[in-house]
Amino acid sequence: MAAPTARREKTRQRLLVAALDVFAEEGFGRSTVEQVCERAGYTRGAFYSNFSSLDELFLAMWEERSSQLITGLRAALAEVPDATPDQALRAALRAIPVDDAWYRVTAEFTAHALRTPGLRRVMAAREQAIQDTILPVVVAALGRAGRRVTDAAALGQALVAVHDGTSVQVLLEPDSDTARLRREELFQHVLESYSTPVNTPISTPVSTPITEEP
Amino acid sequence: MAAPTARREKTRQRLLVAALDVFAEEGFGRSTVEQVCERAGYTRGAFYSNFSSLDELFLAMWEERSSQLITGLRAALAEVPDATPDQALRAALRAIPVDDAWYRVTAEFTAHALRTPGLRRVMAAREQAIQDTILPVVVAALGRAGRRVTDAAALGQALVAVHDGTSVQVLLEPDSDTARLRREELFQHVLESYSTPVNTPISTPVSTPITEEP
DNA sequence: CGTATCGGATACGTTCATGTATCGAAAGGG
DNA sequence: CCCTTTCGATACATGAACGTATCCGATACG
């Protein structure tokens, strides 16, 4: 009973993979248990033996997938330990590409999470994990470039926001890549805005000076 | 026949209003025609007499709602013609509050649009309209503050991205408002990054890592 | 007023997804 | 090698949502 027997694990895995595809194509709300099973090559019996509801599968799939992304991101960043901010940025963007299918699923999951109190925390935690993964690398890279980050937490939040916000724009115009270029531009502006050169002792804060300490 | 008779218009309107509520609560995919009708105080007969599918209703509702938002935004900005960038920003954020229900619906609509080719264009057009509404005001305000915008289109895209990206973060932590503060902070950084003081003759080009200006 | 048309309600039949309960086959253990 | 347990397939009953076709009341119009 304690052993998740290889077979079981495999079908579970195939169901999770199938779920992403189906949800991306049909939308979560419009997806059915049978569609997922069919795509995975099973019948509903297998499903109900592994999950109790589509909701549960959705959560499991999203958690697995997003933690895979974080892992990949961490690995990619670890490969360029001495990167400049620009290089680090590019490495990160390469590790987390703007994927159409994944974006759709994430958008729906977000909506779902916002209306399901328990899931809010899950999402918030995931977002925090992303920031915790990026920040040390970004701060270090900026440091190497002679810049000190003033408010790391704020920078982390800003980077995630920029990623999320620009992803749609990039996906909305698949043919042209001006959106993609502007996206990188924006990232660089943010990196600059949230850091100051160590040489310059005169720190000129923006309009509202916010240098807080939690 | 050409006249949409007052009665018809009223029920159509009530259906649209009900739709937003239902979609926000249940999610679009999980919503049914009957739920919408029930909330609006009609039966399915009324629905099929006005719309041919939930998809059609969804689109109609989203278009109406979002153009209302743009109208409101335009009006709010028109009321403060001599605003500083900071004032203009606050006026805009007041006109487009971060609304939980509307965000959920928008998120799902985005996902839906990304998987429905025809809707992509609709969304893209709407995004463009938003930028066209904001930009002149923002550019003017920055001008009054002695700043010239270098690349207006890029700024518009950035502002929208920041709005979208930070909205989730604000909604994810409803109790604390640090996210909300950081959101404004980020907006201000962006306004600064995409403009340069007219005094300074040395124009520092955008992309590559550069020093901060003023 | 009377009448014709329009708009929404009611009443179908049908399809489809769900969840459970049961059965058979594949692993694993002695 | 058999026996037990586990896992997924099959069968079934139920309920829900759909779309249509029809009917009736309200509204505009002569």
Image (tube, coloured by chain):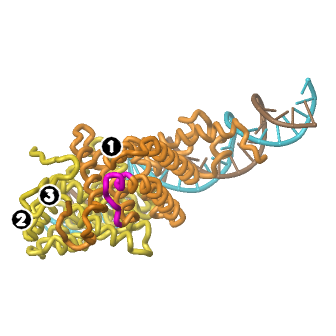
Chain colours: A yellow, B orange, C cyan, D brown
Mark 2–mark 3 distance (CA, rounded to whole Å):
27 Å
Give the mark, 2 or 3, whose residue is nearer the N terminus: 3
Residue C15 or A2: which is nearer the viewer?
Answer: C15
Identify the subunit bearing mark 2. A
Give above or below for A172 relative to A110.
below
Residue A188 x %, y %: 23, 67
Residue stretch in magenta: B141-150
Whole-percent x, y for residue A192 in the image: 19, 63
Decide if residue B169 is on the left or right side of residue C18.
left
**Chain letter belonging to callout 3:** A
Q: Which of marks 1 and 3 is in front?
A: 3
Task: Looking at the image, tell me whether mark 1 or mark 2 is earlier in sequence order.
Answer: 1
Q: How many labels does the image show?
A: 3
Label 2: element kind: loop
Q: Check disc 1 and report the residue beneath it.
A: A116
Q: Which amino acid does label 1 sit on?
A: Thr
Q: What residue type is labelled 2?
A: Asn
Q: Distance between the residues labelled 1 and 2?
A: 48 Å
| Contact flag, marks 2 and 3 (Cβ < 8 Å) | no
Mark 3, residue position: A132
Helix, strand or loop status at disc 3: helix
* Residue toward you, B113 or D21: B113
Residue A118, percent from left and from top? 27, 43
Magenta stretch holds residue A92: no
